[in-house]
Amino acid sequence: MAKVTERYESLVVFSTKLGEDGIKAMVEKFTELISSNGTLENVDEWGKRRLAYEINYETEGYYVLFNFTSAPAFPAELDRIYKITDGVIRSMIVTRV
């Protein structure tokens, strides 16, 4: 039986307080995590952008978009890891059509 996979898109906003090296390390961490649990199709770094509203006294964030395919159970685990990782301001995972 074929392995069931879904296509996902995950947008993550990292804190600019991490600095360039910290942000780079976070992007690498999540790139490796997603690659080891699925197939990473694309990593699109949007860079530093102004937030629509202040979050935790921050007005800017570093945006990164991950496109990947994985088993349906993985996004829940990825979301859990985003939530417990210091330096992640916001994250969102959606299914792509």
Image: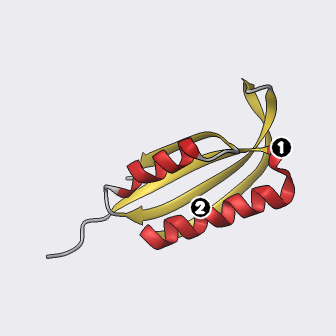
Q: Which residue is mark 2?
A: 30
On the image, the x and y values in percent for residue 44 come to: 66, 60
Q: Amino acid at mark 2?
A: Phe
Q: Is residue 5 above or below residue 79?
A: below
> Mark 1 = which residue?
17
Question: Left or right: where does residue 7 sit relative to residue 41?
Answer: left
Q: Is residue 57 left or right of residue 37?
A: right
Q: Quadrant of residue 55?
A: top right
Q: Residue 83 got which mark?
A: none
| Picture residue at 31% right of the left edge, 65% below the top | 5
Residue at 56% x, 44% y is 84
- Disc 1 secondary structure class: helix
Q: CA distance from mark 2 to mark 1?
A: 18 Å
Q: Give how far across and how far down residue 60 sits, in percent.
A: 81, 36
Left or right of 36 on screen, residue 30: right
Q: Please tell me which residue lies in front, 26 or 7.
A: 26
Q: Report crowding for label 2: few under 14, some 14 to 19, many 20 or more residues within 10 A (C-alpha).
A: some
Q: How many marks?
A: 2
Quadrant of the frame with the N terminus: bottom left
What type is the residue that disc 1 sits on?
Lys
Q: Neighbour class for label 1 at 10 Å: few (<14), some, many (≥20)?
A: few
